[in-house]
Amino acid sequence: MTDLPPGWIRVRLNEIAEVRLGRQRSPKNHSGSQMRPYLRAANVGWEGLKLDDVKLMNFTEEEAQVYRLRPGDIIMSEASGSPGEVGKPALWNGEIADCCFQNTLIRVRSHGPDPKFLLLLLRYEALRGAFVEHSRGVGIHHLGAARLSSWPINLPPLAEQRRIVATLEDHLSRLRVANQYLNRVSVLNATLRESLRCTGVTGSLGMLEPGSRLPVGWKWGRIGDVLDKIEAGKSFRCLPYPAAPGEWGIIKVSAMTWGEFRPEENKTVPADVPVNSHYEIQPGDILVSRANTEEYVGAPVLVRKCRGR
């Protein structure tokens, strides 16, 4: 009996991949006639490889045959003083020719499964702390090639592996873009605060009181003085979306929960209910959440597009 989906199998990692510890660094190999680049734990990050500082070490041709990296190899942090770093993996794509690896890393070389699938699976295990739970050592946590070799893997068919990889990579790419935007906002916010500090303005913009010193060219005023109108929406008896032809869609509060206007978050006003077009949302409108959770009450969004009736 198994609780796995049809076609999946449960195997040990060493049944589907070669698992090997890198070569130990020793003083006799600090120089020699066959110096080659090699990777160490410092070259592996959560976002991929960090290749700005790659060291050299002497590897004979026989040693290089054993420790040379190939495209598709997964390299994992074998040990760390930080529990959250144990087993951190990255994929090698042949970025540096004739590159080997040190014993602070473990290499996983697939015998058939999609390396990208194994990478995502091993990254998940590392992120949830599974590897450190099975590590050994005091102060420095060692995963060990032997323990990793016997690691249980739930393996789907190859086509399913590739489908999972494609789906997760799509979601992860969106998260990376979102994280980049957040980082940009943090930088812009810090720049604005510094600009205000340099002009003598203290505190956040929302906490400034009339009479505070403002930057040159700024002036105090009421928000109503610069807006065409401020008005509340209207409550309607609604049906689930989507709307039938001729029916109005009514924006739900979830349309602006995350700071981005999402016009697909609608309910529908029945066709027999009269709706004044005065309440129609137009591109360029600013919507403010008048009632929401503590985190989002008062949150504004700019309407850039809308679905219309």
Image: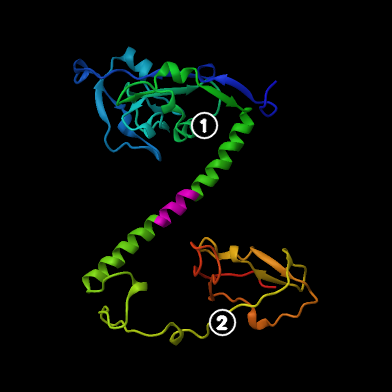
Q: CA distance from mark 1 to mark 2?
A: 51 Å
List the residue tagged with mark 1. Answer: 121
Q: Work out whether residue 230 or residue 178 is closer to the camera in this orientation and state it.
A: 230
Whether tag 1 and tag 2 are in contact, CB under 8 A, the answer is no
Image coordinates for residue 280, horizontal then vertical, percent:
64, 78
Image coordinates for residue 201, horizontal then vertical, percent:
26, 74
Q: Classify mark 2: residues with Cα within 10 Å, few (<14), some (14-19) or many (20+).
A: few
Against 180, is 82 above or below?
A: above
Image coordinates for residue 175, horizontal then vertical, percent:
48, 49
Secondary structure at numbered mark 1: helix
Against 278, is 308 above or below?
A: above
Q: Amino acid at mark 1?
A: Leu
Q: Earlier in the sequence, mark 1 or mark 2?
A: 1
Q: Tell me which segment is drawn in magenta.
A: 175-182
Q: Determine whether, in the image, residue 113 is placed left or right of residue 277.
A: left
List the residue tagged with mark 2. Answer: 231
Secondary structure at numbered mark 2: loop
Q: Determine whether, in the image, residue 16 is placed left or right of residue 30.
A: right
**Residue shown at 25%/29% (left/top)?**
55
**Residue shown at 66%/27% (left/top)?**
4
Image coordinates for residue 132, horizontal then vertical, percent:
41, 28
Q: Determine whether, in the image, residue 35 is placed left or right of residue 82.
A: left
- Would residue 178 be counted in the magenta stretch? yes
State which quarter of the image contains the C terminus.
bottom right
Classify residue 208 by image quadrant: bottom left
